[in-house]
Image (cartoon, grey):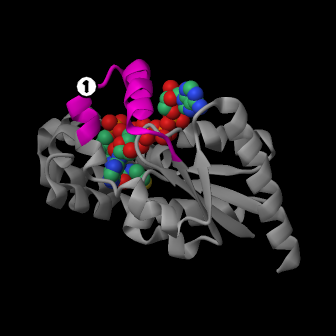
Amino acid sequence: MMIVGLTGGIGSGKTTVAGMFKDLGIPVYIADDAGKRLMSTSEEIKNSIIKIFGEESYHNSDPNRAFIASKVFKDQNLLTRLNNIIHPAVNADFAEWLKHQHSEYVLYEAAILFEIGRNSSCDFSILVIASKKLKIERLQKRDGSSISQIEDRMANQWSDEKKIPMADFLINNDDLESTFKRVKDIHSKILKAGKNS
Ligand SMILES: CC(C)(COP(=O)(O)OP(=O)(O)OC[C@H]1O[C@@H](n2cnc3c(N)ncnc32)[C@H](O)[C@@H]1O)[C@@H](O)C(=O)NCCC(=O)NCCS
Ligand SMILES: Nc1ncnc2c1ncn2[C@@H]1O[C@H](COP(=O)(O)OP(=O)(O)OP(=O)(O)O)[C@@H](O)[C@H]1O
């Protein structure tokens, strides 16, 4: 089964795009959601996080995400340590999930893909982009985030300029109608590539 990686900077619209593939019948694995779930259910992850960030990082079994975010997006070394705890657990969870899927291909959606070399285990990669102005507007509307909170996260992700040449398919997520057209176009190209291989 083919694995298609879907990524994009914060607020680019990757979850919105993933939903469009889901509507076309494609199984979608959302790595950010899996990471969140595993942080709340795995004692091993919880203990490793508390070791680094202290007791304030959890309230019982609930991670204090705002507290952890306030630390890691200001300190690359701490973010790498957090990634090193969560990513192997997400990879194992994805491998297990994949065993139960029956489709020509599945979509693996993640905030960081190229940054951690995860694209090398994908058959194709899709990058969602939008202008910085649009991303900030959408995030402020969705989360009420401040510009500095958004910029801290952007600083920990590669720029679109760096990622664009690495992606097999690009989606410029301006308006939903043209994005859905592009999704259908990419979907048929992936299906065709699968038939020809
Ligand atoms: C730091 C945490 C607790 C903040 O939680 P919060 O609910 O505020 O954010 P959420 O997880 O919904 O992510 C929102 C956006 O932040 C950015 N972001 C999240 N993790 C990362 C990361 N490791 N590197 C760069 N940007 C990131 C992305 O643009 C993402 O879409 C959380 O993001 C986290 O645990 N991140 C590290 C693990 C990870 O890489 N997760 C993503 C793929 S598994
Ligand atoms: N083409 C679009 N037109 C208008 N609003 C959009 C469009 N695409 C996405 N949005 C809105 O912008 C916000 C961000 O989109 P979405 O959550 O899909 O982005 P994301 O890349 O997954 O974000 P994050 O990086 O925070 O996980 C959402 O509220 C979504 O409904």
Place of residue 11 in the rendered image (x, y in percent of width and height, measured from the top left):
44, 37
Q: Which residues are magenta?
A: 129-151
Front in this rendered view, residue 26 or 35: 26
Q: Of all residues shown, which one is farthest toward the right?
A: 195
* Neighbourhood count class around disc 1 (C-alpha, 10 Å): few under 14, some 14–19, many 20 upward: few
Front in this rendered view, residue 181 or 20: 181
Q: Quadrant of the C terminus?
A: bottom right
Judged by its main secondary structure, the magenta piece is helix
Place of residue 19 in the rendered image (x, y in percent of width and height, measured from the top left):
66, 38
Place of residue 7 in the rendered image (x, y in percent of width and height, measured from the top left):
51, 53
Mark 1 residue type? Ser
Q: Residue at x 63, y 58 (%)?
A: 97
In the visual, does 176 lie left or right of 77?
Answer: right
Q: Residue at x 80, y 44 (%)?
A: 24
Q: State the image quarter where residue 149 is shown.
A: top left
Say if the magenta span includes residue 109. Answer: no
Say if the magenta span includes residue 142. Answer: yes
Place of residue 150 in the rendered image (x, y in percent of width and height, measured from the top left):
29, 35
SS at badge 1: loop
Q: Residue at x 25, y 29 (%)?
A: 147
Q: Is residue 43 visible?
A: no
In the visual, does 58 lie left or right of 97?
Answer: left
Q: State the image quarter where residue 124 is shown.
A: bottom right
